[in-house]
Amino acid sequence: MPLHSLVADNFTLRVRHRGGGPVEVCWLGRVDARVPSALLEPFFAELLQAVRELRSREIHFRFEDLEHFNSSTIAALVKFLDQALLAKAPLVLYYDPDKRWQKMTFEVIRRLGRAGIETRPVEG
Amino acid sequence: MSQDICFRIEAPIAPNWPNIELLRTSVLNCLASIFQDSSFCDSVSMITSELLENAVKYGDWDDSDHSFFKLRVSGGEDQVQVHVSNPVDAGSADLKSLLETVEQIGRFENPALAYQNRLKEIAERGEVGVSRLGLPRIAFEGNCDIKAEVVDGVLHIRTLSRN
């Protein structure tokens, strides 16, 4: 299955994959839809399906350039953590520790202690 | 509150989703012209957008006077209050749930635990649709107290953030 980026009104999830490496998803813009799960859940399902078919199964979500997301988006993301776990797809969440809202969000997600989920600050 | 800086933003709002982002960025830009700390400005603008989202989602927009939908952001050097008021159906399950959420947050030792607990519930129950995460996020990321009351069919939610 080919990997497609998701382009919505206010945000883009840009997918990159180089053979053998992780599948990288860069979150850009503002994810502030009223029901973001309507957009994100089909994208996540397609992503996991595509990752299953690739040799490298690791997924990297890069949030450091994201401007804003609402709490409904955080909820959709947290639900995806367990789906990635079930699919045996290790997930790394990159964030900008200089943005306090990102640091606070991802430190709490780290404390959820989900196996196979790593949060990684991007320094500098 | 300092006497040196004192501000007040007040706007009547139409309950349309795109207005939320317009007001979030307006508040962010306004506060950025007052405060040096960009994280604090991000935090207050996040509070504004989460409260407005709740109002648009759960307000009573069928049989009510929309002029009761208002945003007020006010404060000074040390603290900022965000106050959103909107018409509600006093018997609605959404209102009951919202008031319960405010109470629940207060029962945790600190807002971080309330937020973490809600995230765990979402992850473990795999709930779809309503997240009920906005108020715990406000309390935690905004590091603020939340007060909610219903007066004459209008819900008032006030947060107080300290800089």
Image (cartoon, coloured by chain):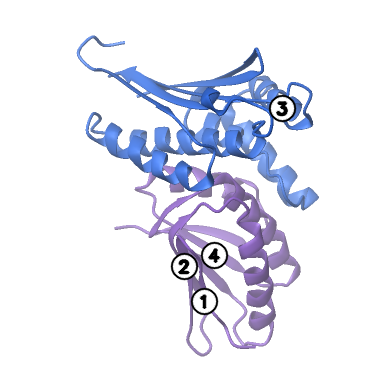
Q: CA distance from mark 4 to mark 2?
A: 19 Å
Q: Residue at x 23, y 17 (%)?
A: B5
> Which mark, residue A12?
2
* Picture coordinates of residue B135, whole percent (x, y): 59, 32
Looking at the colours in the rendered structure, which chain would you say is drawn in purple? A
How many badges with numbers are in the image?
4
Give whichever of A37, B65 is nearer the camera.
Answer: B65
- For chain B, give the colour: blue
The amino acid on which the numbered mark 1 sits, given as a three-letter code, is: Ser
Instruction: Tell me which label, 4 or 2, sits earlier in the chain.
Output: 2
Residue at image mark 1? A5
Tag in front: 3 or 1 = 3
User: Residue B65 falls in which quadrant of the image?
Assistant: top right
Give whichever of B29, B17 is nearer the camera.
Answer: B17
Residue at image mark 3? B95
Callout 2–callout 1 Cβ contact below 8 Å = yes
SS at mark 4? strand
